[in-house]
Image (spheres, rainbow, N blue to C red):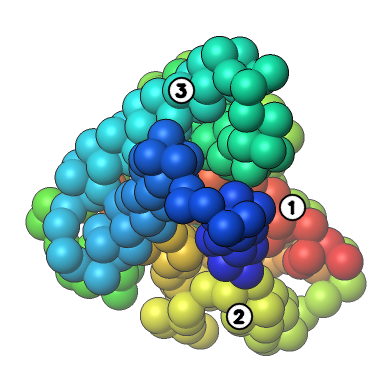
Amino acid sequence: MSARLTFVRIEMAHSLLEDGESKPKSIKFHSRGTALVILLVLLAPLGSKYGFWNFGIGFILLTISAMGALFYFVYGLVRVFKHRKRQQRLLWPTSILITINFLVFGALGYQVNLAREAPPIHDISTDIIDPPLFDKLVPIRGIESNSTVFDSETANRLQVQHYPSVTTLAYPSIDLEEALNRVVLVLEDIGLDIVSVDESKLIVEATDTTFWFGFKDDVVVRIRKSGSGVIYDVRSLSRVGVSDLGTNARRITKILRQLQN
């Protein structure tokens, strides 16, 4: 929907110039360049998701689109300053194009800033001493994916510092069968694909796929008896990449919150 609205705004910028005269070449250049930037922003992740290129190429295309957005943003400002008196009718459509490029560059810049600030960690667990172990998902992940061996040293150094609230959840007055069913319902409710439900090991494995790039993160939830209730431990592991930009910690927090409600 947002992409469609963006293209509508570009068309508005074109239509505002149609007063019997042909569109100035500068506006054509500006609007077509902006449309190309938007197209790159959409194609970069979706092409990676559907296998047309790997995510490395996708990131390169996003970088190019960010540079393009910055260029057309500055180009628009220069045009407005240079022709602010002679071509008043061009100010409104040019302002629309400037705004679009500013928003694109700002959004991509925000993601880059997140990447810089996020710790280099992609495996998060509520229990960093005895984390839940993956079982059926191990062969599915493939040999090129990140290792499923939990790095307790890194977790103790980075996870505790950046995500101190990611801890084991104790849930009173519930039996193991109900607790297991509750996990399945919660994971399905937040959009994860259930891979395995092991009643003997009391673990549920699932996979979450991101919308844009199609990155796959794997989740395992472990249940253990504790008095009249249970304790839940959740682990979320990215298949690729060094840093997850905090995605795994947010996912675990969301799962725990829904398990608690």
Q: Do the numbered discs 1 and 2 sit on residues whose CB atoms are within 8 Å? A: no
Disc sitting over residue 75 in the figure: 3
Image coordinates for residue 169, horizontal then vertical, percent: 74, 52
Decide: is 125 above or below 236.
above
- Residue closest to the eye, 226 or 90: 90
| Residue at which label 2 appears | 188
Q: Do the numbered discs 3 and 1 sit on residues whose CB atoms are within 8 Å? A: no
Q: In the image, what residue occupies the spot 87% across and 66% down? A: 261
> Three-letter amino acid code at disc 3?
Tyr
> Spatial distance from mark 2 to mark 3, Cα to Cα?
47 Å
Please state if 185 lies on the left or on the right of 219 as rendered: right
Depth check, mark 1 against mark 2: the one in front is: 2
The secondary element bearing badge 1 is classed as: strand
> Three-letter amino acid code at disc 1?
Leu
Classify the position of the N terminus by image quarter: bottom right
Q: In the image, what residue occupies the spot 38% across and 40% down? A: 25
- Mark sitting earlier along the chain (3/1): 3
Q: In the image, what residue occupies the spot 72% across and 35% down? A: 165
In the displayed orientation, state which residue is furthest to the left: 143
Please state if 148 lies on the left or on the right of 183 as rendered: left
Q: Quadrant of residue 160?
A: top right
> Three-letter amino acid code at disc 2?
Glu
- Residue closest to the eye, 105 or 169: 105
- Residue closest to the eye, 40 or 260: 40
Image coordinates for residue 30, horizontal then vertical, percent: 43, 38
| Residue at which label 1 appears | 169
- Residue closest to the eye, 155 or 248: 248
